[in-house]
Image (spheres, rainbow, N blue to C red):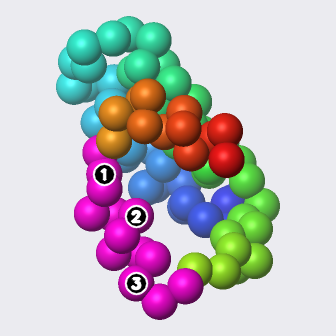
């Protein structure tokens, strides 16, 4: 079992994504694959350090435009 996402939660997320139509089937499949990948991961999140206020800053900016996210990937 994953250290990040337990079996039941992962299954619920995947079921919810499948049952709610998304504008793009490709996006929907990407979301499902992400949840599954997170479920399979061994959990390295404890190694990621966040500065004060960074949690709120990140979450308040969601959901984001894919173009905005691509800019973050290029940094």
**Residue 14 in view here:** no
Q: Earlier in the sequence, mark 3 or mark 2?
A: 3
Residue that appears at 48% across and 49% down: 10
Is residue 45 rendered to the left or right of residue 19?
Answer: right
Q: Quadrant of residue 20?
A: top left
Q: Indicate the secondary structure of the residue bearing disc 2.
A: helix
Comparing labels 1 and 3, the label whose residue is closer to the camera? 3
Label 1 sits on residue: 62
- Exactly how many numbered labels are in the figure? 3
Location of residue 71 in the rendering, given as x and y in whole percent from the top left corner: 54, 38
Residue that appears at 55% across and 61% down: 6
Label 3 sits on residue: 53
Residues tagged 1 and 3 counted as in contact (Cβ below 8 A): no
Label 2 sits on residue: 58
Residue that appears at 36% across and 70% down: 57
Q: Residue furthest top?
A: 25
């Amino acid at each position: 079992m994953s250290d990040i996402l337990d079996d039941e939660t992962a299954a619920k997320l995947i079921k919810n994504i499948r049952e709610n139509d998304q504008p793009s089937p490709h996006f929907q499949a990407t979301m499902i694959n992400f949840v599954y990948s997170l479920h399979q991961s061994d959990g390295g999140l404890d190694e990621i350090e966040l500065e004060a206020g960074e949690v709120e800053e990140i979450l308040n900016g969601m959901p984001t435009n894919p173009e905005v996210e691509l800019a973050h990937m290029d940094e």
